[in-house]
């Protein structure tokens, strides 16, 4: 496994990578949704691999976008 995949990030680093506001990250944690995280005492950490997976899962593929438009789903 790549060393970067074992790296953990704080919420400010996740904000910089994803563009998701800190308030949204915090709200998602309280609602039990969004990017998985670990809590160690009062410290919140996100796995870089989980952040990357989250971003990849929301990737828009142009072929899929065109297909949905043709099917009238957008």
Image: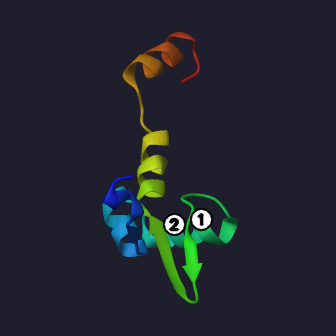
Q: Tell me the residue that label 2 is attached to.
A: 24
Q: Is residue 15 above or below residue 62?
A: below
* Residues at marks 2 and 1, CA–CA distance in whole angstroms: 6 Å
For mark 1, give the secondary structure.
Answer: helix
Residue sitting at 58 percent across and 79 percent down?
39
Residue 59 vs 72, above or below: the answer is below
Colour mode?
A: rainbow
Residue reaching furthest to the front: 1
Residue at horizontal 51%, vertical 78%? Answer: 44
Q: Nearer the viewer, residue 1 or 31?
A: 1
User: Helix or strand or loop: what does disc 2 sit on?
Assistant: helix
* Left or right: 66, with 71 as reference point: left
Residue 59, position as x, y percentages in the image? 42, 37
Disc 1 target residue: 28
**Could you say where residue 35 lies in the image, as x and y percent from the top left?**
54, 59
- Identity of the residue drawn at 49% across and 41% down: 57
Residue farthest along the bottom direction in this orientation:
41
Residue 61 appears at what percent x and percent y? 40, 26
Rendered residue at 43%/42% (across/down):
56
In the depicted structure, whether residue 53 falls above or below residue 63: below
View extreme (right): residue: 31
Which percent across, then down, holds residue 60?
42, 32
Q: Are marks 2 and 1 in contact (CB under 8 Å)?
A: yes
Looking at the rendered structure, the number of numbered marks drawn on it comes to 2
Q: Residues within 10 Å of mark 1 (few under 14, many from 20)?
A: some
């Amino acid at each position: 496994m790549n060393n970067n995949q074992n790296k953990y990030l704080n919420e400010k680093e996740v904000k910089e990578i994803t563009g998701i506001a800190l308030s949204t990250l915090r709200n998602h944690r309280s609602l039990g949704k969004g990017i998985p995280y670990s809590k160690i005492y009062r410290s919140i950490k996100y796995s870089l691999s989980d952040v990357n997976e989250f971003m990849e899962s929301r990737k828009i593929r142009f072929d899929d976008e065109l297909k949905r438009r043709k099917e009238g789903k957008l």
